[in-house]
Amino acid sequence: QVQVVESGGGLVQPGGSLRLSCSISENILTFDAMAWYRQAPGKQRELVAHIGRIIHYSDHVKDRFTISRDVAKNTVYLQMNYLGPEDTAVYYCNAAKITGDVVTDYWGQGTQVTVSS
């Protein structure tokens, strides 16, 4: 059973920074892609950043957030800078394996990020 565990969330003032970590129980190179999503109250879960054969950011976070991975630690990071209240959400880590047309997703429990003065 793959375990995905996020950490690093918390309360930060506008303009501040946080680094989220996502620890995976398997070698992250066995996954086709890893991503960070977020879900704000009353809104749908949305993709924030994706790392696999390419790196992709949503327009909302481009130039402020950076996704990276440490293969030796089986960990994916999300460095978040210049945070604003609109970034307040529960952030989820996703790991995906793709076999043909079948995508198997593994999710963490989420970590709360609150941006407020």
Image: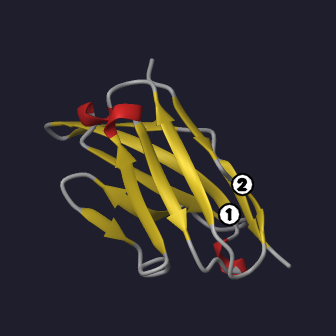
The residue indicated by pointer 1 is 89
Q: How many marks?
A: 2
- Compared across the picture, whether 83 is left or right of 21 comes to right
The residue shown at (70%, 69%) is: 88
Q: CA distance from mark 1 to mark 2?
A: 6 Å
Of residues 74 and 104, the one drawn nearer to the viewer in this rendering: 74
What amino acid is at disc 1?
Ala
The residue shown at (57%, 53%) is: 20
Residue density around tag 2, few if under 14, some if 14–19, many if 20 or more, within 10 Å:
many
Q: Are marks 1 and 2 in contact (CB under 8 Å)?
A: yes
Relative to 63, say whether 32 is above or below: above
Query: Helix, strand or loop at disc 2?
Result: strand
Query: Helix, strand or loop at disc 1?
Result: strand
Identity of the residue furthest to the right in this view: 117
The residue indicated by pointer 2 is 112
- Compared across the picture, whether 32 is left or right of 95 comes to left
- Name the colour scheme: secondary structure
What amino acid is at disc 2?
Gln
Identity of the residue furthest to the left in this view: 100
Residue 30: name its quadrant.
top left
Relative to 41, say whether 26 is above or below: above
Relative to 61, say whether 54 is above or below: above
